[in-house]
Image (cartoon, rainbow, N blue to C red):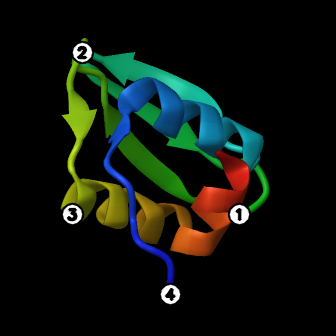
């Protein structure tokens, strides 16, 4: 099993978009992404200059239905 990286929100959103997610809406500093085919929904915090910590990245991946290896392939 590969090590889960701590990512910036920009890199995480880019990887999710490559996986087929599209922006649904944004409320404040939280971007809601949805996958059109699977209807999976996830929320990514957009905080300038800060990284998204590993536990939150793991929770976002679980919401999206992706594995760590899938994320690393999309980066």
**11 versus 66 height, above or below:** above
Give the numbered dot on residue 49.
Answer: 2
Circle nearer the N terminus (2, 4): 4
Alpha carbon separation for disc pair 3 and 4: 16 Å
The residue at the point 38 percent across, 30 percent down is: 9
Decide which of 63, 10 is in the foreground and name it. 10
Circle nearer the N terminus (1, 2): 1
Alpha carbon separation for disc pair 1 and 2: 31 Å
SS state under label 3: helix
Alpha carbon separation for disc pair 3 and 2: 18 Å
Mark 1: few/some/many CA within 10 Å (<14, 14-19, 20+): few
Circle nearer the N terminus (3, 2): 2
The residue at the point 31 percent across, 64 percent down is: 59
Identify the residue under disc 1: 38
Alpha carbon separation for disc pair 1 and 4: 25 Å
Image coordinates of residue 24 in percent, x first then y, are: 55, 29
The residue at the point 70 percent across, 50 percent down is: 74
Identify the residue under disc 3: 55
SS state under label 2: loop
Mark 3: few/some/many CA within 10 Å (<14, 14-19, 20+): few
Residue 22 at least partly seen? yes
The residue at the point 46 percent across, 63 percent down is: 61
Give the numbered dot on residue 1.
Answer: 4
């Amino acid at each position: 099993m590969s090590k889960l990286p701590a990512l910036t929100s920009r890199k995480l959103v880019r990887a999710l978009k490559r996986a087929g997610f599209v922006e649904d809406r944004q409320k404040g500093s939280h971007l809601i992404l949805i996958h059109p085919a699977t209807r999976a929904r996830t929320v990514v915090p957009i905080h300038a200059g800060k990284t998204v910590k590993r536990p939150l990245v793991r929770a976002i991946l679980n919401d999206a239905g992706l594995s760590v290896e899938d994320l690393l392939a999309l980066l």
